[in-house]
Amino acid sequence: MARYNAEKSTKEQVEVAKQEQTARYVPAGVLVYDNKQFKFYNKTKSSLYFWGDKIADTPKAIEPVPRIIPIDAYYYILGDEFERRTIQIIGQNGEDRISFEMYFKNELAVKYTAVFILLILVKDGNVQVHTQMTSFDKSDW
């Protein structure tokens, strides 16, 4: 009986170790817009590799070399051009919703796409952006 319990305990420990190892590479993150910058905070338990993005109906922009986002760090994308175009389209006052995608690989080179809805508010020429993540799934971007 003691041997059975020891084998069962060892199998359970191996299973827990596998789950922890797998969880280490599952991507997680937060996107915020602040000070004319989109900031993606890496909440994964390992580094993420940012390859590119796509906003609304524009073509995907995939870089030849990724940007590495270490654990608990962030990567920023300047928003000056985004704000200029937003005001051209929406005007000095208005709102809109657009899609935004970010393309990543984890440390195992598995591809993922983070999909967001950007809620854009423009008041007297000042742009505010509220982000909502809708998915962060394996993909073949």
Image (tube, grey):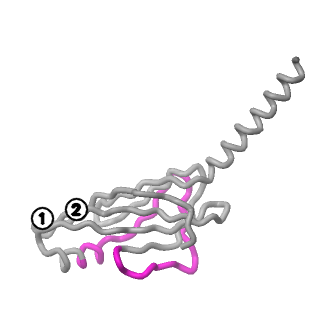
Q: Callout 2, which amino acid?
A: Gln
- The verdict on residue 107 being magenta is no
44 on left or right of 13: left
Name the spot of residue 45 as percent of width and height, x first. 58, 49
Q: Which residue type does callout 1 highlight? A: Lys
User: In the shown orientation, is residue 18 left or right of residue 6?
Assistant: left
Residue under the image location 59 percent in, 57 percent down: 47
Relative to residue 73, is residue 62 depicted above or below? below
- Choose top left, top right, bottom left or bottom right for residue 101: bottom left
Q: Considering only vertical position in the picture, is 57 above or below 13?
A: below
Q: Vertically, is 29 above or below 12?
A: below
Depth check, front residue: 127 or 28? 28
For disc 1, the marked residue is 123
Structural distance between the alpha carbons of marks 1 and 2: 8 Å
Q: How many marks?
A: 2
Q: Which residue sits at x=36%, y=64%?
A: 38
Q: Position of residue 91 (x, y in %)?
A: 14, 75
> Residue 11: which quarter of the image?
top right
Give the extent of the magenta segment: 56-85
Q: Secondary structure at mark 2?
A: strand
- Residue 28 against residue 127 in the figure, above or below: above
Expressed as whole percent of the image width and height from the top left, the position of residue 59 reads: 42, 82
Mark 1 and mark 2 in contact? Answer it, CB < 8 Å.
yes
Q: The residue tagged with tag 1: helix, strand or loop? A: strand
Residue drawn 22% across the image and 67% down it: 96
Q: What residue is disc 2 on?
A: 128
State the residue in front, 113 or 122: 113
